[in-house]
Amino acid sequence: MSPRMLPAGDDPIRPAASTPVAITLDGERLEGIAGQSIAGVILASGQLGFRRTSAAGRPRGIFCGIGVCFDCMVEVDGARDVRACQRRAVDGNAVTTQHDALPVPPSSERGGSDD
């Protein structure tokens, strides 16, 4: 038997069967596989935006996908500012989208007083 005739099931480098994981995003159940990032699970569900900008409230999702930018920040199990592209999804993760309004400057920094 030649090496090319090795049955696929007997191939020692064949990947193991995937293990399903389920997370929630703002209460919606999403399914993925073990080893997949939270961003990967969200993107696979068809959702592209899961954060809103502070200034205009525009949707943001994955920009760099390697942990350099901050466009994919989410809250995971109560921990804020988690980069979804860098965190592996764990079965049962509760993910919520983040939106932080811009801080309002104190009245003394607005350029004068009304006196």
Image: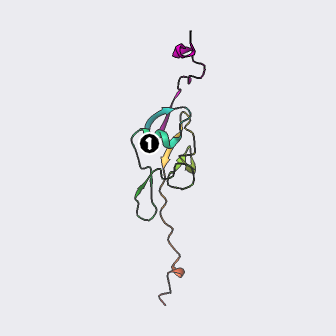
Residue at 53% in and 56% down: 70
Scheme of image coloration: rainbow
Name the foreground residue: 26 vs 3. 3
| Left or right: 50 in relation to 92 | left
x, y percentage for residue 16? 56, 23
Q: Crowding at label 1, few (<14), some or many (≥20) Cα neighbours within 10 Å?
A: some
- Residue that extends furthest to the top in the rendered view of this protein: 1
Q: Residue at x 52, y 16 (%)?
A: 8
Residue 85 shown left or right of residue 56 in the figure: right
User: Where residue 96 appears, x then y in whole percent?
Assistant: 49, 46
> What residue did someone put label 1 on?
43
Query: Residue 9's x, y, as percent?
Result: 53, 15
Q: Residue furthest right?
A: 12
- Residue 5 forms part of the magenta stretch: yes
Farthest-out residue, bottom: 115
- Residue 27, visible in the rendered structure: no
Camera sees residue 51: yes
Quarter of the figure that contains the N terminus = top right
Image location (x, y in percent) of residue 14: 56, 22
Please give the name of the residue rendered at 57% of the width and 43% of the height, measured from the top-left corner: 87
Residue at left offset 41%, top offset 47%: 48
Query: Is 16 situated above or below 106?
Result: above
Left or right: residue 59 versus residue 83 is: left
Q: Residues in magenta?
A: 1-24
Q: Check disc 1 and report its element: helix, strand or loop.
A: helix
| Residue 69 to residue 76: above or below | below
Considering depth in this image, is 6 or 91 the residue closer to the camera? 6
Query: Mark 1: which amino acid?
Result: Leu
In magenta stretch: residue 28 = no
How many marks on residues?
1
